[in-house]
Image (spheres, rainbow, N blue to C red):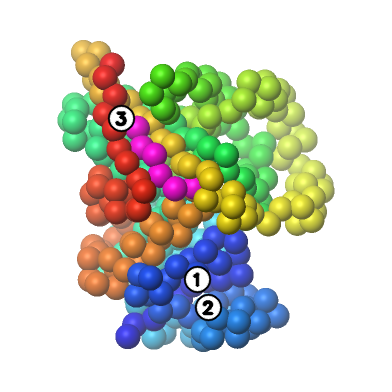
């Protein structure tokens, strides 16, 4: 049976994927750049393992030679995705990752023709970033085919962040916010807009704009030209986010990032099972056209990291079963708006305007 290379296997989300892989009939080869970290993990689970640094193209090619799919879980992906994608292009290996970083999605778009020529699929964002939002975007587009504007919002209710997520956020500090306007990605101030969002019936939460991956993926999935993405955020944090616009020189400086990374390394691992069982992921979306006609819907599903592991394995299983197309693909454009409903305990609801 074909095996899948799980690169970055010692990360938090990768650990959840390892635990669930057998339930989806996915046989894993654990991989990473540190034998010191990967070998004990492989021995604990009784799985094969391979070691390669992302900067060593020869070693990367060697660990990919006989596997049909790599599931890439080593972030920050803005640094790690391209060398793995290039190795997949050289070796004819399908590429999946769990990023939510806009530059990585745009990078995949740029590699579309090369992937098509090599007859492989490149798909980023096969987890909470961006499967639920991408599916909801397409669902709204199908309900309102002439939509010109799209808003999406997320809330990982009662959840916590992992070491990898925090490191990725840190990597992007000082960059600013972003929206898609008239089909183009446009830089804007951090938290430049706020919005009250009905994630649940009768309950509104304050959200602020964030540069979420759907500014890229939802555009390629739906071709809606104007997109904003939001996250539920307490008012005090919104005020702090707005203040950060005046501190980009500090937040983006190498010495500050080194200091903050040391704090992350010491203090963050990820939510424990009790937190993951309690937490829920909530997603809301609204689309409207030039006449002002609008549609809204919301999703509720498992906690974000749990959802990521399940969605990533379902998509991996699809690829192994031959359900893929060459080139760069988004989750919803490839598997449809109901892909998210294949995740257990996930529901979707239309909202009356």
Residue 83, percent from left and from top: 52, 67
Residue 285 vertical placement versus 54 (above, below): above
Residue 211 vertical placement versus 90 (above, below): above
Category of crowding for the residue at label 3, using alpha-carbon neighbours closer than 10 angstroms: few (below 14), some (14–19), many (at least 20): many
At horizontal 35% and vertical 53% (from top left) the residue drawn is 344
- Could one spot residue 227 in this view of the protein? no
Q: CA distance from mark 1 to mark 3?
A: 33 Å
Q: CA distance from mark 1 to mark 2?
A: 9 Å
Q: Quadrant of residue 65?
A: bottom left
- Which residue was labeled with disc 1? 18
The label number, if any, that marks residue 297 in the structure image: 3
At horizontal 24% and vertical 72% (from top left) the residue drawn is 321
Q: Considering only order in the chain, which callout, 3 or 2, is on the residue closer to the N terminus?
A: 2
- Which residue was labeled with disc 2? 30
Q: Quadrant of residue 176?
A: top right
Looking at the image, residue 132 sits to the left or right of residue 238; the answer is left
Find numbered disc 3 in the image and state the secondary structure of the residue it sits on.
strand
Question: Magenta stretch?
Answer: 297-303
Which numbered disc, 1 or 2, marks the residue closer to the eye? 1
At horizontal 63% and vertical 20% (from top left) the residue drawn is 235
Q: Quadrant of the N terminus?
A: bottom left
Q: Considering only order in the chain, which callout, 2 or 1, is on the residue closer to the N terminus?
A: 1
At horizontal 62% and vertical 37% (from top left) the residue drawn is 175
């Amino acid at each position: 049976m074909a095996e899948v290379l799980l690169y970055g296997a010692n990360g938090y989300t990768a650990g959840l994927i390892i635990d669930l892989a057998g339930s989806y009939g996915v046989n894993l080869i654990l991989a990473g750049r540190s034998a010191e970290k990967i070998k004990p993990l492989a021995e604990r689970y009784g799985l094969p393992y391979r070691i390669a640094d992302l900067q060593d193209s020869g070693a990367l090619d060697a660990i990919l030679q006989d596997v049909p799919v790599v599931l890439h879980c080593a972030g920050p992906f803005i640094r790690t995705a391209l060398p793995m994608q290039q190795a997949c292009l050289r070796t004819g290996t399908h590429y999946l990752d769990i990023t939510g970083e806009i530059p990585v999605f745009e990078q995949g778009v740029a590699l579309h023709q090369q992937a098509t020529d090599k007859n492989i699929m490149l798909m980023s964002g096969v987890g909470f970033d961006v499967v639920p939002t991408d599916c909801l975007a397409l669902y709204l587009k199908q309900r309102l085919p002439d939509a010109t504007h799209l808003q999406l919002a997320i809330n990982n209710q009662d959840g916590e962040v992992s070491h990898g997520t925090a490191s990725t956020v840190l990597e992007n500090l000082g960059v600013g916010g972003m929206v898609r306007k008239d089909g183009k990605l446009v830089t804007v101030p951090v938290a430049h807009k706020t919005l009250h969002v009905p994630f649940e019936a009768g309950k509104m939460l304050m959200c602020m704009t964030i540069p979420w991956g759907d500014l890229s993926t939802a555009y390629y999935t739906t071709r809606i030209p104007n997109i904003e993405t939001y996250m539920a955020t307490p008012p005090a944090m919104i005020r702090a986010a707005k203040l950060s616009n005046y501190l980009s020189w500090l937040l983006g400086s190498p010495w500050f990032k080194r200091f903050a990374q040391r704090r992350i390394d010491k203090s963050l691992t990820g939510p424990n099972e009790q937190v993951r069982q309690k937490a829920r992921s909530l997603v809301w979306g609204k689309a409207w056209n030039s006449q002002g006609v609008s549609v809204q819907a919301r999703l509720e599903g498992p906690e974000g990291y749990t959802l990521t592991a399940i969605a990533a394995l379902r998509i991996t299983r699809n690829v192994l079963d031959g359900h893929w197309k060459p080139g760069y693909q988004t989750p919803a454009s490839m598997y449809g708006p109901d892909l998210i409903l294949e995740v257990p305990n996930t529901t979707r609801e239309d909202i009356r305007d």
